[in-house]
Image (cartoon, rainbow, N blue to C red):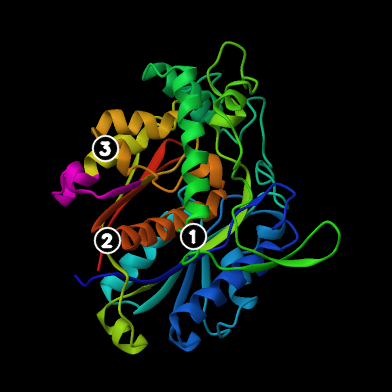
């Protein structure tokens, strides 16, 4: 079996719902990040053999195979195909897994793994056409197995907090820390190497280069976060302890040894291990804990040997429960902030987090990084990379 290397990685700065990035059609936004990846790696577009792109809400402007639409909106030749992946929030992390497996097998030598989501233009739920009385496209056999249960990430977040005995104060403090880390990283220029500037239109009609994640609250306080209304009476989760709706795209250039020679490139990192698992679809958000157990066992790496972790902040209980379960070091977790501050562009987040992880490993001179995220339906992906 061959190796899979990450040659280049870039992302757009996130945009808030209805914010600076909302003027971009998702196919054009994804096409722009493909162009940026090619330019930054000095890659001949003709060498790219496929584009595998994560996207969750594949409806409206993100329908009809958004990956192919992105290719058609980019400088890639029309001979380059594209396919779209939906593993819910882990869609573009799964795109990376598919791309890595493809080059490891030798079927192709150079593949782009990417993700995009315009949550302003294609809102959550738009793709759920066949809804029943339970609010989801739930078949009769699922209803027999889970009678009367609505599969909800919000319910899952509350269940996770309760199961792991996480208080509202703990969740609020975690969210505050996410904003503080993201603000500090931005001010220190930690994101400059990974963010692809894109042109956006301001409300007054003027143009600017968008380079700063729009969701970061640079001046927030713990008291302000504590004061946000609960999503459910008697619950523990608020909008402040949840990931932000976000518009964004990210892309990774993946190659094997032959691909590296063709590109004339030195890799940033090697894909060391990949895991995907499924678990309880009701609590839903807990699976990263058990997927990480499997990944560490199969890879033979101890949690202490991992230098940095990116655990998607879909809701604050997820990374906190993950830390407690794995015994990980809090100082290694989401060191530049997470989705609570930076935004969670659904299908784009997997590639976005990997871009941030690789650049953070390089910036800190570290070796191993682990990325995981919870996914609708009770699934999780885990990727371990080695910086080269």
Residue 252 visible to the viewer: no
Are the residues at dot 2 and dot 1 in contact (C-beta closer than 8 Å)? no
The crowd level at tag 1 (other Cα within 10 Å; few <14, some 14-19, many 20+) is: few
Mark whose residue sits in front, 2 or 1: 1
User: In front: 356, or 85?
Assistant: 356
Find out whether residue 9 is within the magenta segment.
Answer: no
Q: Is residue 115 above or below residue 221?
A: below
Q: CA distance from mark 3 to mark 1?
A: 24 Å
Q: Is residue 109 above or below residue 46?
A: above
Q: In the rendering, at what x and y percent does residue 217 appear?
A: 61, 41
Determine which of the numbered discs, if any, sits on residue 329 in the image: 3
Residue of label 2:
365
For image coordinates 65% across by 20% down, the residue present is 229
Residue of label 1:
189
Picture quarter containing residue 359?
A: bottom left
Mark whose residue sits in front, 2 or 3: 2
On the rendered structure, is 4 left or right of 56? left
Q: Which residues are magenta?
A: 295-309
For image coordinates 33% across by 66% down, the residue present is 100
């Amino acid at each position: 079996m061959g190796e899979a290397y990450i040659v280049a990685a870039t992302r757009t700065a996130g945009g808030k719902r209805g914010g600076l990035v909302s003027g971009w059609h998702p196919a054009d936004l994804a096409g722009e990040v493909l162009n940026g990846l090619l330019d930054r790696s000095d890659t001949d577009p003709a060498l790219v053999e496929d584009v595998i792109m994560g996207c969750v809400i594949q409806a409206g402007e993100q329908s009809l195979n958004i990956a192919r639409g992105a290719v058609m909106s980019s400088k890639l030749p029309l001979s380059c195909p594209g396919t779209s992946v939906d593993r819910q929030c882990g869609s573009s992390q799964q795109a990376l897994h598919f791309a890595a497996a493809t080059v490891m097998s030798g079927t192709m030598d150079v593949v782009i793994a990417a993700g995009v989501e315009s949550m302003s233009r294609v809102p959550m739920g738009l793709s759920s056409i066949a809804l029943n009385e339970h609010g989801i496209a739930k078949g009769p056999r699922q209803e027999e197995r889970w009678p009367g249960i609505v599969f909800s990430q919000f319910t899952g977040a509350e269940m996770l907090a309760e199961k792991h005995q996480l208080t509202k104060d703990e969740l609020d403090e975690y969210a505050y820390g996410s904003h503080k880390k993201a603000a500090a990283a931005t001010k220190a220029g930690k994101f400059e190497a990974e963010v692809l500037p894109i042109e956006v239109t301001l409300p007054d009609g003027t143009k600017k280069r968008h380079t700063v994640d729009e969701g970061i609250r640079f001046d927030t306080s713990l008291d302000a976060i504590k004061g946000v209304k609960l999503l459910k009476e008697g619950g523990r989760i608020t909008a402040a302890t949840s990931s932000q709706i976000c518009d964004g795209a990210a892309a990774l250039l993946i190659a094997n040894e032959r691909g590296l020679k063709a590109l004339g490139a030195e890799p940033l990192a090697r894909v060391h291990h990949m895991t995907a698992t499924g678990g309880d679809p009701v609590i839903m958000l807990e699976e990263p804990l058990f997927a990480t157990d499997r990944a560490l066992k199969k890879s033979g790496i101890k949690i202490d040997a991992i230098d940095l972790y990116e655990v998607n902040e879909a809701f604050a209980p997820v990374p906190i429960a993950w830390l407690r379960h794995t015994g990980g070091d809090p100082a290694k977790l989401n060191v530049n902030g997470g989705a609570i501050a930076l935004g969670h562009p659904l299908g784009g987040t997997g590639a976005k987090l990997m871009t941030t992880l690789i650049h953070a490993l390089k910036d800190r001179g570290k070796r191993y990084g682990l990325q995981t995220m919870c996914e609708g339906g009770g699934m999780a992906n885990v990727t371990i990379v080695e910086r080269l």
